[in-house]
Amino acid sequence: MEHKGTKIIETERLILRPFQIEDAEFMFRNWASDPVVTKFMTWPTHEDVSVSEQVIQDWISKEDDPENYQWALEWKETCEPIGSMGAVRVDNRTESVTVGYCIGRSWWGKGFTAEALRAVIGFFFDEVGMNCVNACHDPRNPNSGKVMKKGGMTYEGTWRAGGVNNLGVCDESWYSILKEEYYGGRTPEIIIRNEGADDYRAVEELTRKAFWNVYVPGCSEHYLVHVMREHEDFIPELDLVAVTAEGKIVGNVMYTRATLCNEKGEEAPVLTFGPISVLPEYQRQGIGKMLLEYSFGQAREMGYLAIVIFGNPADYTARGFKSCKKYNVYAMDGSFPSAMMVKELEEGLLDGRKWFYRESPVYDVKGSDAEKFEERFEPMEKGFSPSQEEFYIHSHSVIKG
């Protein structure tokens, strides 16, 4: 288990993100000041926006704590928070977390809370490595129990007089979901195989959907996929797709050759992958993990000893990647980029000597060419998302030597 803190999570309609002090007005207006909304809460109705400010400031002060999880539920349509969701309790001994949530009355009955809960459950299993996610509600508020069921949780029982809320001492109805249930019930049957020529268009479309507006408004990763297949550094044996039992392609990963060179002029062949793509509606179901773990095995059999990538460390450290600095692997400019990570497929290749990483020139995609290629697809609206700022920070950060 590896705590990650309040990372940004995106769903179809919501962005789950850390709170900002500017959210106080929305919090007060949209849910915290409404006594109907707070009736079954364990915290009092906010009488003034200053109370909301104080609560949010307290959450912000804990942002550096990796065991702190408190998300604002921002509705993409209005770009304002409509509720909150967070970890009420974290138990490291049992690797479990208790989740609590609250959403404004105007958004009740529209599936927003269940949508957010499913995403948070996926985050705790896929990213943090929890074994159990649970939640409870006052039996007099049965709609909250319906949300838990829609999130995949199972009713465990009712603890009589087990809690206290704004109505006084109350019963608590508990629900939970285990890691094995999550993966057994939510991950579709998947076949991993090599991409074929008949798959090209489907893979380009899924890559476009997976990356659209994630790093920049729009994306160019689908064009990279298109040109990568013809490049001399491309490795067809490590071009893999994830396919459902119904034959739908829902994920893809592609590898190219790369090089490590040292100060003596010696070179060591290594790998890099990217893009790795999973259709948005199939994300957080373990499919990306399956593609990576399968490809690692294939790469070992082919004799490759290491993989070097650029990416969000939160996405890859659980797969065995470590900071490039720990292996003394530099970028060509002599820096240790925060986003550059290394995974040894066989221990001992990187023995502390100074190495410089040189990736394939196929990644030097021209924006004008990508824009022209984009004309072949149905229009999608470009826009801003918080993940773009996160990408900017990671891609412009270096670790001091």
Image: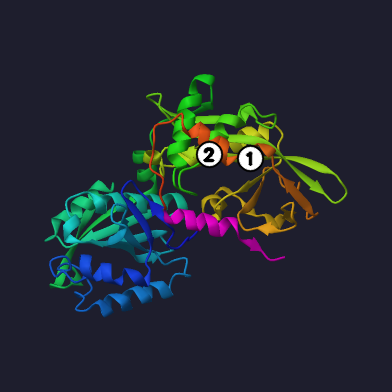
Numbered disc 2: secondary structure? helix
Left/right of residue 98 with respect to residue 232 in the rendered view: left
Find the magenta span and give its range: 385-401
Q: Residue at x 39, y 32 (%)?
A: 378
Q: Quadrant of residue 164?
A: bottom left
Q: Residue at x 30, y 72 (%)?
A: 24
Numbered mark located on residue 363 in the image: 1
Q: Quadrant of residue 42?
A: bottom left
Q: Determine crowd level at label 1: few under 14, some 14-19, many 20+ residues with C-alpha closer than 10 A.
A: some
Residue 120 visible within the image: yes
Amino acid identity at mark 2: Glu
Numbered disc 1: secondary structure? helix
* Residue in the foreground of this view, choosing between 116 and 165: 116
Q: Quadrant of residue 313?
A: bottom right
Residue denoted by label 2: 221
Q: Determine crowd level at label 2: few under 14, some 14-19, many 20+ residues with C-alpha closer than 10 A.
A: many
Amino acid identity at mark 1: Tyr
* Residue in the foreground of this view, choosing between 311 and 294: 311
* Residue in the foreground of this view, choosing between 29 and 192: 29
Considering every residue shown, the one lying at the far top of the view is 198
Question: Where is the C terminus found, in terms of image quarters?
Answer: bottom right
